[in-house]
Amino acid sequence: MRIGLSLSVATGLYGISFGALSVAAGLSFWQTVALSALMFTGGSQFAFIGVVAGGGAGASALGAATLLGVRNAVYGMSMNALVRPRGGLRLLAAHVTIDESNAAASSQTHPLEERRGFWTAGVGVWLLWNLFTVVGALLGNALGDPARWGLDGAAVAAFLGLLWPRLSAREPVAVAVVCALVTALTIPVLPPGLPILVAAVVAALLGRSRRRGADAAGAAPGRTEAGA
């Protein structure tokens, strides 16, 4: 719950910058509010208003937002197994399956804490993100550059805080470095949303190769059953 609440505050505050930038891009107050309440995935929302602000068509804005939102479908498969929502809660769980709720749940080892992390982060981020979107949309350009307030780095800092304790061995550090490098190299040549998906595929392939290596080592001749 502490992790979920900290992510909610950090990400929610970032909603101020989205609200201000959305109004500056030409969306109305109510369009901005609806985008946060219904689309509810920060990266996709920023991609959407970024295309609109650049003079792009609605279809192009929707395409960029969709590419970034694909990752939530991937999260959904693992979160469904961890959280196991029932009935109407399945729809709510699907709506609040985002980076933060996935991170808060997957960073735990006990099933009860996984569910607490998911719901605390998912619902908490939704409430605060929408609240601060309203604040940002009302204040508009009066806020100036969101980076001056450090709001552009709040969500990034929260994720680094979750990631850092997990980099306790060489292998996770190596995977993180490789995926970061892949992302950096593909950003200039791929459309928005695709670089992070390519990095995710690379991470999955690395994990698959490691599992195959472990299985092969376990099946090596001369190993005892207990040792395997």
Image (cartoon, helix red, strand yellow):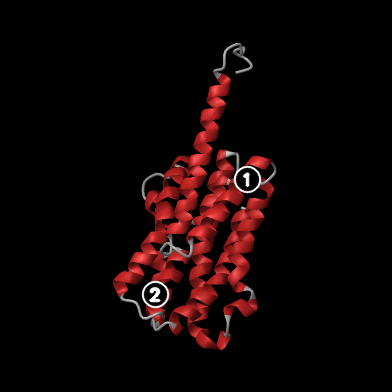
Q: Quarter holding the C terminus?
A: top right
Residue shown at the point (46%, 47%) measured from the top left: 201
Along the line of sight, the residue nearer the viewer: 183 or 146: 183
Residue shown at the point (53%, 25%) measured from the top left: 215
Query: Residue 175 appears at what percent x and percent y?
Result: 59, 46
In which image quadrant can residue 80 be found? top left
Q: Which of marks 1 and 2 is nearer the N terminus?
A: 2
Crowdedness near tag 1: few (<14), some (14–19) or many (≥20) residues, C-alpha within 10 Å: few
* Residue type for callout 2: Val
Residue beneath disc 2: 51
Query: Residue 97 appears at what percent x and percent y?
Result: 45, 54
Residue shown at the point (53%, 62%) measured from the top left: 125
Relative to 2, 55 lies left or right: left
Along the line of sight, the residue nearer the viewer: 173 or 97: 173
Query: Residue 168 appears at what percent x and percent y?
Result: 70, 43
Helix, strand or loop status at disc 2:
helix
Residue shown at the point (40%, 79%) measured from the top left: 54
In which image quadrant can residue 51 be found? bottom left
Helix, strand or loop status at disc 1:
helix
Crowdedness near tag 2: few (<14), some (14–19) or many (≥20) residues, C-alpha within 10 Å: many
Q: Could you tell me if residue 201 is visible in this image?
A: yes
Q: Marks 1/2: CA distance?
A: 34 Å
Residue beneath disc 1: 174
